[in-house]
Image (cartoon, rainbow, N blue to C red):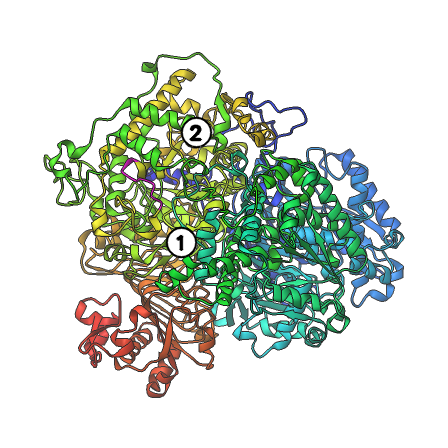
Amino acid sequence: MRLTQAAMMAVIAAGAASAFHTHIPRPHSAVVGQSTTSLNAFHLKEGETPNMFEGPAPLVKERDACGVGFIANTKSGDEFGTHKVLAQGLRALDCMEHRGACGGDGISGDGAGIMTQIPWKLFKDYRSENCPKPGVGMVFLPQEEARRNEVKEVIEKVCEANELQFLGWREVPVDPSTLGPQARDAAPSMWQMFVKAPTRLDDDEETRDGFERTLYLVRRRIAVELKATGLLKKDDGSEEVYFASFSSQTIVYKGMVQGCVLPQFYKDLTNENYTTKFVIYHRRFSTNTNPKWPLAQPMRVVGHNGEINTLIGNVNWVRAREKSKTLPEESLQDLVGKENTDNIVMMCNTQDVPNLLEPLVDLNRSDSANLDAVFELMTKSRHRAPCALMGLVPTAYENEPSLSNNPEIVDFYKFHGGLLEAWDGPALLVYSDGKSIGASLDRNGLRPARYSITDDGTVYMMSETGVVDLDEADIVQKGRLGPGQMINVDLTSGEFKDNIAIKSEIASRHPYGEWIAAGRKDVTRMSFEDDRIYDDATTTFAQGSFGWGLEDIGMQIQDMAGSGKETTYSMGDDAPIAVLSERPHTPYNYFKQRFAQVTNPPIDPLREGVVMSVAMTLGKKESIYQVSEKGARLIHLESPVLNSSEMGRIAEMAKEENGGFAQATISTRYDLSAGPEGMKAAIDAICDKAAEDVRSGKEVLILSDMAADQSILDTTTYIPPLVAVGAVHHRLIAEGLRMDTGIVVETGSAWSTHHFACLVGYGANAVHPYLALETVKQWHGSARTQKMMDAGKLTKTTLDEAQANYRKAVENGLLKILSKMGISLLSSYQGAQIFEAMGLGSEVVDTSFKGTTSRIGGVGLSDIASETVMMRPETASEKAKLVNYGYYKPVPKMGEYHANSSDLAKLLHNAIGLDKAVSAATTRDEKENDGVKPKSVADYEIFKKSLEAAPLANIRDLLDFESDRESIPIDEVEPASEIMKRFCTGAMSLGALSREAHETLAIAVNRVGGKSNSGEGGEDVIRGQDLTDVDEKGRSPTFPHLAGLKNGDSANSYVHQVASGRFGVTPQFLTTAKQLEIKMAQGAKPGEGGQLPGPKVSEYIAGLRASKQGVTLISPPPHHDIYSIEDLAQLIHDLHAVNEDAGVSVKLVSSIGIGTVACGVAKAQADVIQISGGDGGTGASPLSSIKHAGMPWEMGLSEAHSALLSNGLRDRVTLRVDGGIRTGRDIAIAAMMGAEEFGFGTIAMIAEGCVMARVCHLNTCPVGVTSQKEELRKKFPGTPEHVVNFFMFVAEEIRELMAHLGYSKFEDMIGRADLLKEDDAQIARIAKTKGISLSGFFSSIPDSSGDRGFLRATPAEGGGLKDDVVHVNGFSSDLDREICSHPDVKAAIENNEGDTAVSFNIKNTDRSTCAMLAGDIARKYGNNGLEGNLNINMFGSAGQSFGAFTLPGMRVRLTGEANDYVGKGMHGGEIVVLPEADAGFVAADSSIVGNACLYGATGGDFHANGRAGERFCVRNSGAYAVCEGTGDHCCEYMTGGVVVALGTVGRNVGAGMTGGIGYFYDEDGRFEERVNGEIVKYQRVVTAAGELQLRNIVERHFEKTGSEKAEGILDNWDEEVSKFWQVYPPSEASSAVVADTILGDTIKVSAVAPSEDLCYLPVGAGLNPDQTTRCAD
């Protein structure tokens, strides 16, 4: 329901401090501070502990994103600065409140803080003439006085022992009454300590480097001493002693508070004596709610907005470096002497002497804390702060046009890239070491970063513009950070340096280019050899022994070698997980790839590959803390996939004259006679040999399972290469040797992209897939392949080309796997272990995969050895064939089990009365009831029994029910009609499905009161009205292609999906939904965008999606406006604004850490969270994604429910689940794990006629369910009644289960996992499941049997049914409400005529402004029905999503500036953004709007008198947009409209652009190197029509904005027009503006002109004065 105005205002008032409304949480047994009750049914087995939330803390416990910025002014005030700088910083912090969040109590903030220069005036009592600037520690101490005094005593002793004269303690003045309950309960006692520098450092005053190093090392020594005395923290982790800062230059004030509360809590911050030259401010949005004061930011040197995706690998490599850089222990005793402390930080000796120094990195800390620790150490080891950050977070320097004149910067990155793995992930980093202050953006630019410089020299850098109120007349420069860019301010001189200036200065400090030329050896891609290494019989035997099946050659090798692409497949993964399979599996299949969702974005390897690289290195890596020429001595590999020629090239480098890289080959084969137990000894042997070889100086290790001939294959087996490389990698780390060598895996057991990802992810530097290349040769030389090439069924290739194709497919597949986790560099992926194990026991994990989570146990080493041997063929012979395991396609009899089969479809069709032979193409019209036979209970029982008796496939198959009460009669159970209201259909798009299938499903689920889902393809407006024209035969003229209709039926999907492609997302689409779903991930391919093959893009589908018929549609990964938790919150805010009646659901995919992600989504004000299993269906997806990404929903659902319940957030959201759900039993189990609603995907398609042909991606579905071909669609056999019959059967099955369990109401089973138990008989069914245990995982679910309050909405929202309540936006929509309620605006909408003008002031906290107005109009008039004109004039700095979803008739004008997402989803009307008339900066050179403007726009005119950020007009399909320059990725995925850029643009213009036209003014003559030419072409403006279109658009821009840039171009048009480039895709090649081919064609110059004849100009015509005025007006 839509809350009443009174109720809404009450909610808003209750949460006045929040951008969202807040609430008082309902207490639960698992809320912080109370114990969590374990399940009765899952008593832990002896020796087990609950493990649901086991794993690295940043992954499973807490993730965050934030708003951050800095202010620096070195010119005003005295040497200590001014209080004004601090006050402005605190104001900015308050204005970023919406970028943070609150804890479960709705008051305690997730964290806010500042870093400043030490306020010496405030601390005058602790300064003296002989100690003017002491070291100052900001310390969080225990609240308990006795414990606090003990801690103080230890701290003072350590300081005195290290010659730091203790000057005293100062209790920080605070006001605890300002804190929320949770923050207050966890708050430490705040103290400051002051120490004098050692006399040995008297000559250090100028730089204070020695003093800072001593303070740094003493701080880490204090932590060790506190831990040794048991005082560091309590056993439960609370009351941790924490140094927020300890420095003689900077200080940090932070806490678990909202931004506005920080100065209220810390009274110092309002003291006028608190003066500073700079301030860094930070507001945190955490996915969790348990207050942890140390996690607030800034950290000690960094304020971080983002997430480090490579964290586990980064930490592993830091530890490996520490182990390999050991100093004598006695050297660590002196923490004062300048030379000695210099040596300590240069050698980074920490982890291996933990009794002396606190470990540098720790996976129990946040990603920000770990990054801060390494960054801080680098700044202490002679790296200047910007230099350290350049090394840690490098830009994408390869082929970067902006660096073409700065080779020294490129050389810097090449050098450091060989030494240091990038800390990769979306990040805006603000930093200060006290000497300089600056900010840097990650290589993808997936965080907003704006800055302004005023005439008094102040630099303002911020996540959002407008957070500080500045007079535009005082601003001399406005700008933004682009991808990988940096700015820096010297805090002594005040000098501001931009990206090139600071980086060139840093890079020029050493001759990196000379070092690289002298030391680095390159292995470039070389030609492939034609010679075979085995004959066919031996090849087939080897393939079989390594686990190859017929499908691997017939599907994967054929596609990869034949076309250079991974295999595309459909329908999802319905085969058993590897540990439950009765067939043998390679170890790779026990790993699931992790992926990014919500807290960090996946990136786009297809369209944004310019920022990605698969290059790797081999050799010994030198210290990252001490730069020297030796660091360049490495072997650089262009590709990680090596052929025999490249292996030979590497071998040559062992010679002294070629570099002297000593090498050793270690065989991973061992005698077959050793049996399964022999593998452990073989692993120990290769690890011992590896350590011995590296100690002897070997810099390249080759782990090889290659057998010289058949005789070796006959007598030996092998350690699977993944097990081998993991074991060697971790042994070398443990012995401090890993940095001294590179590892090449030479194997016959790697052919799929997933295999390569696993090998690199667990330590391999490169892979030589000798048997895969041999298989390509075998395949290429076969008669069948040659015939297919001759027939044109395969592209004709040479053998070298086929092998190169295979390598290309592997490399691209690796990039895809990296990208779905948001990682750009394979070197950062190496050793990062970004997987979850599924079915591996602790013995295997401890041996080879340390640190990898495996939560249900599983196989041991002997099991793996046995499986390996099971794959071996009996003998080698010419007639031998590989086994067809049927892992992908079902194979009769001997193949792998598949739950969804044609046999299953037949059984279900029999039960629901469906005959696939009855359709519009046959005799349906002649049959009674459209051929729908009576449903059969007996046949449904057969269907159900077939699944019950089937082989094990899913985790739920290992569970059984165990009730806590007696059975009841079934007539006491609630009716099926009530249960079916919880049923939903999966998000299957119109396009993936035919119209018939899509509409039939919607009608059926609407009939039973469930929730149908549009999927991501949009929806025809004709479906918005209930049917009233159905005749007695069940036919409707509205839907003539459907049968079995009834009056009152609705084909309008209940849920309308908003996905990354924004296909079909218009204001009317949004306002006709009852719920709006944000697709963050898809079960079949999480971390990737949707895919619709070109043949399925019919004219109808293209019309709905505003795209081109026949052109393949690939959606971008979800990162353009949902790249972090606060940006997801913004999209939720947008949707709640445009349709206040609709709840917002967020679709996630099961993965480790989903619990903490779900908490963040709940705090972002989602109404529903959907958990999809990794086995979900799809219309088209890469095969490796279907098989190897995403976890079972049983795990993700349980984790999400448990985390939400434990954090007091469960009552905020409804939990929905889908993925392979087929029966009432599945639903009952899901309910007990916490689900309230249930989605049906593939099985619902089967219920309307799908026969599981698995050709969805080919557009050849034989029954028209997934085809757009007219002749196949006529064969569609389904009716709504068939689907309703299925739903009824499932509901009745649930009722029977409820009666058996003794439950009358379905909701009473929700969250009752205590009604489940492990089924020992099922676990014992196959040998390799003996190591499985579910109790550790499921015992973590809180017991909710006594507290059922989470099933109702929050008390603040009335406490009713959650389905009836929709969250409302808080103060951030107040301006929108004011606009909508303005009498003139209301009258204009009601009267639908005339012109109306209104004016308002706007600030950055006003977000989604005009979205509510657009929603009101769309509800009344649809997309295009408004006849009058609404002129909305705004003044100020607009918040995010300004002008979202504007419609024709809306004219929005902003004088000032705007942040990200201006014009998001714009459908029509006009948006104009221009600076104030007296602005002191040059508009054309300054940023005026942010990133991702006009994302998903479908119409309208846009004019910005200034520069736009990254990703301008992504997925634009109809808007006409003008700006005066853009960042990277302009016009990406564009399918229509026109874009004009009157200034320079970043790189990658037109990537994925399939429609529309772009015009780009090339001022610097370098536009050509910035175009992505994969699809688009470009030319000068050579046609009269093109020139006419461009000139009129530029004229309109000048008239709308007064742009000086446009005026200058127009004044000298004949010359300036020659500087424009026109960019166009193939679909526009024959248009008049491109080719002058159509005489008399009309040229569109505006999307919002008042009439068609003005909107389109005849070719050769110009606008007359009257037309110009009317068009402009």
Mark 1: amino acid: Ser
- Say which residue label 1 marks: 1060
Q: Is residue 1088 left or right of residue 236?
A: left
Residue 491 image position (x, y, % from top left): 67, 67
Q: Which residues are magenta?
A: 1247-1254
Quadrant in the picture for residue 1449: bottom left
Please report whichever mark, 2 or 1, sits nearer to the chain's N-terminal start.
Answer: 2
Q: Disc 2 and disc 1: Cα gap in Å? A: 38 Å
Residue 1233 image position (x, y, % from top left): 48, 29
Q: Residue at x 24, y 40 (%)?
A: 1000
Q: Main secondary structure of the magenta part?
A: loop
Quarter of the image containing the N terminus?
A: top left
Instruction: Please tell me which residue lies in front, 1507 or 675.
Output: 675
Asked if 923 appears above or below 1578 in the picture, the reply is: above
Q: Residue 950, which numbered label?
A: 2
Mark 2 surroundings: few (<14), some (14-19) or many (≥20) residues within 10 A: few
Q: Is residue 507 magenta?
A: no
Q: Is residue 996 visible?
A: yes
Instruction: Please tell me which residue lies in front, 1484 or 251.
Output: 1484
What element does badge 1 sit on? loop
Quadrant in the picture for residue 738: bottom right
Instruction: Please tell me which residue lies in front, 270 or 1543.
Output: 1543
Quadrant in the picture for residue 274: bottom right
Residue 475 image position (x, y, % from top left): 51, 71
Mark 2: amino acid: Ala
